[in-house]
Image (cartoon, rainbow, N blue to C red):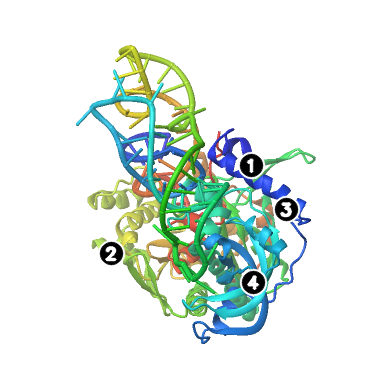
Amino acid sequence: MTEEQNHSPNSAGDQIRQIRIQKLADLADKGVNPYPYVFNKTADAAELQDKYSNLEAGAETEDEYSVAGRVMAVRNSGMFIDLMDSSGKIQIFSHKQNLSEEQMQILKLIDIGDIVGFTGTIRRTPRGELSIKATSLTMLSKSLLPLPEKFHGLTDVETRYRQRYVDMIVNEDVRKTFRTRSLIIQKIREYLTNKGFLEVETPMLHPQAGGANARPFITHHNTLDMDMFLRIAPELYLKRLMVGGVSEKIFEINRSFRNEGIDVRHNPEFTMMELYQAYVDYNEMMTLLENMVSSVAQEVLGTMKIKYGDNEIDLTPPWDRKTMIGAIAEKTGVDFSTCFTVEDAKAKAKSLGVDPEDCDNWGKVIDLIFEEKVEPDLIQPIHIIDYPREISPLAKVHRDNDRLTERFETRINGWEIANAFSELTDPIDQRMRFEAQMQAKANGDDEAMPIDEDYICALEHGAPPMGGLGMGIDRIVMLLTNSPSIRDVIAFPTLKKRQ
RNA sequence: GCGCCUGUAGCUCAGCCGGUAGAGCAAUCCCCUUUUAAGGGAGAGGUCGCGCGUUCGAAUCGCGCCAGGCGCACCA
């Protein structure tokens, strides 16, 4: 945001800023660089709070430390300062007995929001607050703009997202969420590398968008003079790597982009983990997923029983498994395993109060009924298995039923958090699946996958049988941090440009 | 894309059956000087999201636009 947008001339904000710019000049007059290069910090706030937790009120020590952080509150004309670093807070006690006249002058120029370093001895005040009795102070960064109010903080949702740095300064919960996000991803990485998976990277710029049913972002490469697509999934490239055989177990954690609606569970760019393992099927993927997610929860939160909103969710494996058709039969009493035609399926859908108008095949009808009748009630973790062939163009046909595929989607709290298959490795079948997608596209399905000739070529060189799994990282983070919106777990969520 | 709600000082909010704006915090100056939402005093700070209309007069009423939230649609 530019200064012009943020501060109209003569506004209160601009006055505050002008006063602080004057303080920069005052500091310069005293020979102080308000933006120096280094500071020798010797302790974190939390470290000291922990180390001196048994120090009695009123006790003084000779132990000297240098701390640094952001000034969050000033009391008694600067005698007491709450200093916050990324670990926590500690109080600074600045008395004229302990500071030079020059230092006292600089103290007067400190504002809430400045980053300052203090050196001094540890004491606990008579009122019980652990403090650094300052013997020197160092301005480390003069802030020019005021922070939100100390009591109510920043609550305006738009400002929180647009100026996330302010949100983070003021709201400890936000900082904590992003630390937890980082830890979750680190633990997933650890889990997979410990199991022998190799982390790889594949292109984000694709000549055509594939690997999922979604509308892509289109961009243009000038020198090549060709349109390119931001990837909607890494899937087809990861399976090319499996053909190549760099490793029999690979994974990628990175961004995908989908040009679709934005809501509490969708951001145009989002983070997915996809993994592939040779010589196993989707059953192994279910086991791997539930073991991985539950152990990550255990490591990050110390428990497998998590709270999300009003729900208590138990991630302890094994998770429930139901076939899609079985789950529908259980919920509605209608058995689609003996229903073979689109017309028959549509008639059954209507009898259940579901409108199947846009469904042009059996599989889509089943999927629609599942979404409307079964999905909303799936709070506890569950693998929904054996999806219809028509809606699963990259999954191997089910070994016992050629109308279905060996595919599952895992749902937690009603959300799809993972999608996995026994990967389709038969190049002849894959070509037919792509052709069926092209037919769907011709019939108006603008999210149908285009045929990827090079991918088929890769399969024609021979891909090992393999299980593959995709997992939405943002949604896992939402669950493990009890965040109601995906924007709470993405540092800088996509927002419309201000005009 | 559709529906509902929101937008007033840097921040958090009043004011909204029309008479051109208030509080607390932050900031400024003074007092106080072992406080912790420190305290006391004084003064300052505003194109009331933007535009057009109705009206003698609009933060307030109407229409349009912008931005955000929630729900629906699409999707992971």
Q: Nearer the viewer, residue B15 or A476?
A: B15
Q: Position of residue A486 (x, y in %)?
A: 48, 56
| Mark 3 burial class by Cα count in 10 Å: few <14, some 14-19, many 20+ | some
Give me the disc on residue A329. 2
Q: Is residue A90 above or below residue A461?
A: below
Label 3 or label 1, whichever comes before in sequence order: 1
What secondary structure is found at the residue carrying circle 4? loop
* Residue at the (61%, 49%) spot, across then down: A209
Label 4 or label 3, whichever comes before in sequence order: 3
Residue type beneath disc 4: Gln
Q: Are marks 4 and 3 in contact (CB under 8 Å)?
A: no
Mark nearest the camera among 3 and 1 is 3
Disc 1 target residue: A18
Q: Chain of mark 2?
A: A
Marks 3/1: CA distance?
A: 14 Å
What secondary structure is found at the residue carrying circle 2? helix
* Residue at the (26%, 64%) spot, across then down: A331
Residue type beneath disc 1: Gln
Disc 3 target residue: A27
Mark nearest the camera among 2 and 1 is 1
Q: Position of residue B70 (x, y in %)?
A: 37, 49
Q: Chain of mark 3?
A: A
What secondary structure is found at the residue carrying circle 3? helix
Disc 4 target residue: A97
| Mark 1 burial class by Cα count in 10 Å: few <14, some 14-19, many 20+ | some
Mark nearest the camera among 4 and 3 is 4
